[in-house]
Image (cartoon, rainbow, N blue to C red):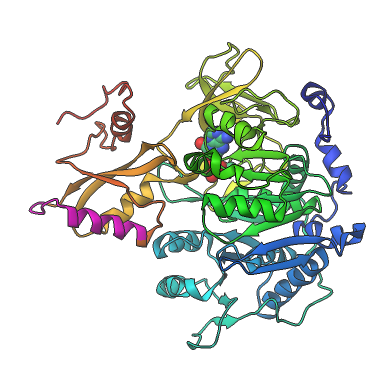
Amino acid sequence: MSHIGNYDDARKNFTWEISEKELGYVPGAVINIGEYCTDRICRMGKADKLALIWEGHDGHVKKYTFNDMRQLTNTIAAFLKSNGIGDGERVCLFMDKVPELYFGFLGVLKLGAIAQPLFSAFGADSLLTRLEDAGTSVVITQKKHLAKVRTIVPQLPTLKLIVVVDDDGVKPLREKEVAFHMDEAERVDSFDIFPSLAETPSVLHYTSGTTGKPKGAQHVHYSLISQYITAKYVLDLHDDDIYWCTADPGWVTGTSYGIIGPWANGVTQCVTDTGFKAESWYRFLETMKITVWYSAPTAIRSLMKEGIDVVKKFDLSALRHLCSVGEPLNAEAVLWSQEAFGRMFHDTFWQTETGSMMITNFPGMPIKPGSMGKPFPGITAGVVDLSTFEEITTPGLVGLIAIRPGWPSMFRTYWKNEATYQNKFKNGWYLCGDRASIDEDGYYWFVGRDDDVINTAGHLVGPFEIESALLEHPAVAESAAVGKPDPVNMEVVKVFIALKPGIEANKMLELDIMNFVRKKLSALAMPQDIEFVASLPRTRSGKIMRRVLRAKEWGEDIGDISTLEND
Ligand code: 6R9
């Protein structure tokens, strides 16, 4: 049984106070996410319940109860404190999906510091941009990623400490570097948890935009009110569920619904640190007896490619609820999941900035395959005109997705960039930067992004970061990065490059440029296709018209190009 029945009734009766009451929070009181996910669950009689079942890439399994998690998060918080780190400082978690990443995140929050999770796949440049912007004090990492951190240390004057969670003593640690072994450390049973209030900063998640460097969306501890109740209602979490969120905590899905939401509900989570492979994912679902699964369209499309026969080899009878996020979920994928698992994936739409789900397919609500569903109860949403920002009330007309500000997990600013934050609000709405239409039944249909950000496999990649990296390549004069259609990843990065005079385009150079970006930024940001051009289309004011290049890739109408510079 879902927690609340009918969508319309839920919408009528819902207030955020329901969540506050369930969490025992009263306005003005202390609210610390780290405490809520661990100590509070133990106090509710679940100390011996499993919090995390983790599987490493070599098949090694580790299990931790809520009491283990309570103590280990204390231990990490105490370790940081004893090294002189205090509240408000930014602590970056730069690790694969190991237990230390999950407990480190909560430990940082217990200390009152700000957790800054970053993908371990990031190259040195991607890492530097984000640590520099945040003025980060600590990086917690694994020895396999230490080399990347070391190359940028000289450029990070604010960095005080680098914690290595799996140091084996083979290579000597350097200045500022310390070893910490979570599983062997003497456990701290009681830690003086920082008395954070609703508006105390909690998490800093970097996200990419069209222009400028990635921006740090800053969240606060009060976000828990949204994350707890959306996890409960939309993911339909119950006490006996075994839940799997496939997202990496470098992405907001991996923290809001891979750490905070489920654990604040006292639910057992499974994590696998193995990469994607259809058979190993099905095996994981089977052996862990996963009941609720939150994944993403790219993964689902990859599973579709392997075919239904593979699914049928496994006993997935425990599975009862499936959700998806990150990109448009094609109608075919929804129908395929019905055939493969006997259940439809429930699409959910939200963003780093929103901190929690905004538009969702509620359990029990009829699914229209291809639609993102309807606003979560408590969320007032609409689509607004592209230029006047007035609400569009005609069904089927496309506008910008807009949300009325004030939900608990709304980001509070972009780190050191209040002007860009303010710019996201127009006519009393927060604008997501996406286009959609609403049908006569109130269902939202995604159309596309309203900017040049590339969504590859559910990850947002800013063209600016790629173009900046490319400029450092000795052969490149200028470039433009756009998303190109891809059957599995939705989009992949394509770059148009004008070479410096006298340099000739060839296959070797192409591969060299691809590798250059992969190493500097990440595999996702690496161009899958390079087209060498004599010059790039520009506006009269000199801006590169990515829109023109993108439209060609998608076979779309180029639109108004009257502002295009004459060549
Ligand atoms: C949670 C997350 C946000 C952007 C968003 C939109 C796209 C997310 C979607 C979706 C279509 C969905 N997006 N969910 N597009 N249907 N169900 O993904 O955060 O990384 O900040 O990305 O992703 O473009 O604006 P984030």
Q: Nearer the viewer, residue 503 or 413?
A: 503
Q: Is residue 422 above or below residue 99?
A: above
Q: Is residue 238 above or below residue 132?
A: above
Residue 132 screen position, x and y as percent: 47, 63
Which residue does the image show at 7% across and 53% down from the upper left? 502
Determine the main secondary structure of the stretch shown in magenta. helix
Q: Exactly how many numbered labels are in the figure?
A: 0
Q: Is residue 134 visible?
A: yes
Q: Please state if 123 lies on the left or on the right of 257 as rendered.
A: left
Is residue 107 one of those drawn in magenta? no
> Magenta region: which residues?
501-518
State which quarter of the image contains the N terminus: top right
Residue 497 screen position, x and y as percent: 22, 46
Residue 143 screen position, x and y as percent: 51, 76
As drawn, the residue found furthest toward the left would be 502
Which residue does the image show at 41% across and 65% down from the upper left? 124
Which residue does the image show at 85% across and 53% down from the upper left? 29
Q: Is residue 413 above or below residue 403?
A: below
State which quarter of the image contains the C terminus: top left
Is residue 517 one of those drawn in magenta? yes
Q: Please state if 142 lies on the left or on the right of 539 as rendered.
A: right
